[in-house]
Amino acid sequence: MNGETNIVTNLINQIIKNNEDQIFFTKDEEIVINKYTDFYHLKVNEKIKNFNYLDPDSLIFMNDGYAEIDDDGYPFDDIEVKNFILNTKYKNFKYQVALYKQLLDFAKIKNNNDIKVLVDIGCGKGGGVSFYKNFYNFDYCIGIDLTRVNIDVAKKHEKKVNFFIASATNLPINDNTVDVITSVESIFYYDPMSKFAQEAFRVLKDNGKLLISADLTEKQEKIMEDTFLNNGLVLYDKKNITKNVRMGCCISKSRFMDISFSESIIMSNDETKYFGENKTFKQYKNFIFIKKENNYAKIWLQMFCL
């Protein structure tokens, strides 16, 4: 047991920066921090008024969710298969868990993988990265978020993940130490995105993957892809999952009525984002970017990518 502990400790020391840099946030980041801090306290007050609602510290997911749908557009269950039987911690969030799972499925990362280090940026209350650590074979998982209340909740319910309050534009991680970065519904909070792209390139190992789930307009998609390419992160593949996420919202808004009224309202509002086909409506997509040396990124894109 001591041997295993020493191995983990040595790995942590290799990955995490050992310095005392003060954390600075931009004005836009401070707005995000205040937004989610206020939202947490709103749910605290909801719990006081309605004893049947879940404790806010148990509301560990903050994404729209994902539902498998058949050719006729009807949902069906696919999350609870072999090796993915969800325990009580995750039961209320089956579709939110599914959003995290299908992102790794898209990247062909299995739960018996040999990947060492995964970092979830914009981890919120840690539900997604907790799921990754408990159901996959990653040696080490890190959760990064701006908001202290989110990280405090995450630390309460998950002890096997290391959580840090930090900006996506100033990661407390050493160079070339990370195999996979995930970012679910938070990419447009990174201010500025170009600085995040530089940080992602810095901490990823060569050929490391940046996996993104995001709702975005056509214009936002182009800006994101160009920003990443200019910083050595090459688009390898992408997939439109708008209908799946819309169905996840649709189901969740009803289910959440029994556990959190405010969460139910969010699901209802988010569902409406995904109706329509014109350029002003948002599409929900998965993206795989791969770290390539800047000098070769554009050549690699022309040769191998879409």
Image (spheres, grey):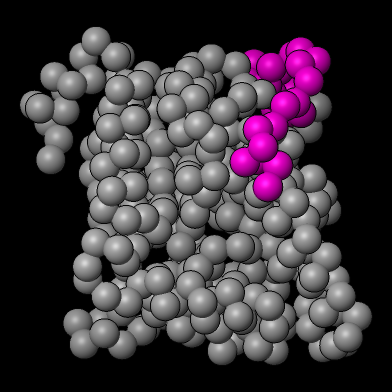
How many numbered discs, if any?
Answer: 0
Regarding residue 122, the answer to whether it shows in the image is: yes
In which quadrant of the rendered image does the C terminus lie?
Answer: top left
Task: State the predominant SS element of the stretch in magenta.
Answer: helix
In terms of image quadrants, where is residue 131?
bottom right
In terms of image quadrants, where is residue 294?
top left
- 196 lies left or right of 1: left
- The residue under the point 37% across, 83% down is 76
Q: Is residue 29 above or below residue 245?
A: above
Q: Nearer the viewer, residue 177 or 40?
A: 40
The magenta segment is 3-31
- 50 lies left or right of 229: right
Judge whether residue 8 is colored magenta. Answer: yes
- The residue under the point 18% across, 21% down is 298
Judge whether residue 47 is colored magenta. Answer: no
Q: Position of residue 41 (x, y in %)?
A: 83, 65
- 93 lies left or right of 100: right
Q: Position of residue 113 (x, y in %)?
A: 44, 42
Q: Is residue 36 above or below residue 74?
A: above
In which quadrant of the rendered image does the N terminus lie?
Answer: top right
Single out the residue that lies furthest toward the top. Answer: 295
Q: Is residue 297 above or below residue 103?
A: above
- The residue under the point 22% across, 71% down is 277
Regarding residue 126, the answer to whether it shows in the image is: no
- 55 lies left or right of 284: right
